[in-house]
Amino acid sequence: MTVSKMTWRPQYRSSKFRHVFGKAATKESCYDGVPITRSVQDNNFCAVNPRFLAVITECAGGGAFLVLSINHTGKVDPLHPRISGHRGNVLDVKWNPFNDFCIASCSEDTTVKVWEIPPHGVLKNLTSPWKELQGHSRRVGLIEWHPTANNILFSTAYDYQVMIWNLDCPEQVMKNPVRTISSHTDVVLSMSFNTDGSLLATTCKDRKVRLIESRSGNLLQEANCKKHKASKVLFLGNMKMLFTSGTSRWNDRQFALWDQDDLSVPLLEENLDGSSGVLFPFYDPDTHMLYLAGKGDGNMRYYEISSEKPYIHYLTEYRSNLPQKGMGVMPKRGLDVSSCEVFRFYKLVTTKSLIEPLSMIVPRRSESYQEDIYPMTAGNKPALTAEEWLSGIDKGPVLMSLKPGCQVAESYSEMSKGPGNSLDTRRSQSKPGALQLAYIQDQLGIKGGKEDSGNTEDDRSQTPVSNGEDLALCSPPRTENELRLKFHKQQEEIRRLRELLNQRDVHVKQLELEIKNIRNSQSHQSSP
């Protein structure tokens, strides 16, 4: 007779992220009075980087979006300058992952436009883009930047085409993409890249999930699951899995997990609830956490992903009374590591014209840097140029540390000198009329440094950035007095820059008069 020993297993998983909680920003740290778009498109309508926040706004006649400084919290001026170069409603905006001053937008007017943002923000309405991409025949609904190659942009429209654009081309108006992917029979609902950008996953209105080789456009796999109608797709980092959210055949909200190498049957399907709003998935490859936010919901569920069954482990849920229309996500280099923040959303609340930052925090007693929750992460340096990627090279992202004091970004002036960067000096010289106040000050900073060498604030635009913020503004204001002081400093700097610009204008006019006088005198001498 053999006695089998029963092994006891705990009912919970040991995880450092079991107690992650969501912390909404105070009212003073929100962006109030933003006329958020009323478009019914199932997009996020918001894009964030460590310097700026972009949000699509409601407007009459054409399409526009706002670009606000990330520190420009509180009440937003209703007359704040906008980017308004589209002739139809703007449907999607995305920041260049390698250039915090470059943003792409797509619209119902069938175009994609790429814009340069001045380093100190938008000071007047922008209507002239850096690049205009004219290839689609119907409205463009989605755009995505390549995750490792510089200046490669993907766009998809209601003509069922996915187009690949190389922005390093010299033309200002581009009509021919480097490649067109025609594998879809209906509207593409979402796109997602794997870590090195060699694979592209898409969901389509025809209920199919497709895996495509991003460079050649070859269709590698196709999933046709009648029980799951996918609307959003996401690559789960290097775990060789795909995550899709959508609805079941009974119109229950549902998510599914797929093996990247075999899309015939999903690894896992799970129904959530009977609500009708689209589920937006967000994945953090550093912590392996997955966040699910429903359109029109106030709550947000989050999970932890593992490579073994049951693959998805429910952690908890953030609850709020404010329904979200869309969500922007801050890149990891812009997080506040001193408070153990591992993810930050920017929640669009249309009912209150409000954008509410929402931080996901790991509770820790120690205030020192927690290396175990901040591994090396994708930085703001491209691993490849556009030409290298198009020639057939694939590389993973260039990693960086989030430890305070590490330089994680270059100043604007350094980026404008870098090889292959979209903000090169030749382009800025070709459009002197579009230069903004702060950019002129940067360009003339070398000459002005002799006159204002005693003032350290002149070089603020050239200071290195740590954790996504200027070293001088490393920590956000904690009290109302600190906020007031920083506001007054900012106003003083704007006033000083305006005076400097006026001086330059006077100097330019004097030089023009001198040139005119010299030409007149030369013409009089040559006439007899």
Image (tube, rainbow, N blue to C red):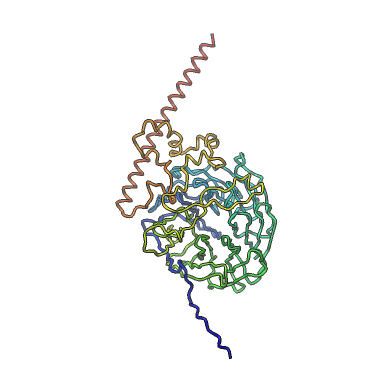
Percent from the top left, x then y, of residue 57?
49, 53
Quadrant of the image occupied by residue 463: top left
Q: In which quarter of the image is the C terminus?
A: top right
Q: Can residue 386 be seen in this view?
A: yes
Looking at the image, the residue that sits furthest to the bottom is: 1
Q: In this view, does 219 lie to the left or right of 197?
A: right
Q: How many labels does the image show?
A: 0
Q: Can residue 234 be seen in this view?
A: no
Q: In the depicted view, which residue is nearer to us: 253 or 336?
A: 336
Q: Is residue 80 left or right of residue 131?
A: left
Residue 440: percent from left, percent from top: 45, 36
In this view, the residue farthest toward the left is 481
Out of 420 and 348, give the one closest to the viewer: 420
Quarter placement of the N terminus: bottom right
For the view shown, which residue lies furthest in the top direction? Answer: 528
The one nearer the camera, 150 or 250, is: 150
Q: Nearer the viewer, residue 65 or 27?
A: 27
Residue 164, given in percent of the width and then of the height, sits at 64, 50
| Vertical order, 502 against 183 (above or below) | above
Residue 20, image x, y percentages? 43, 66
Above-or-below relation of 416 to 282: above
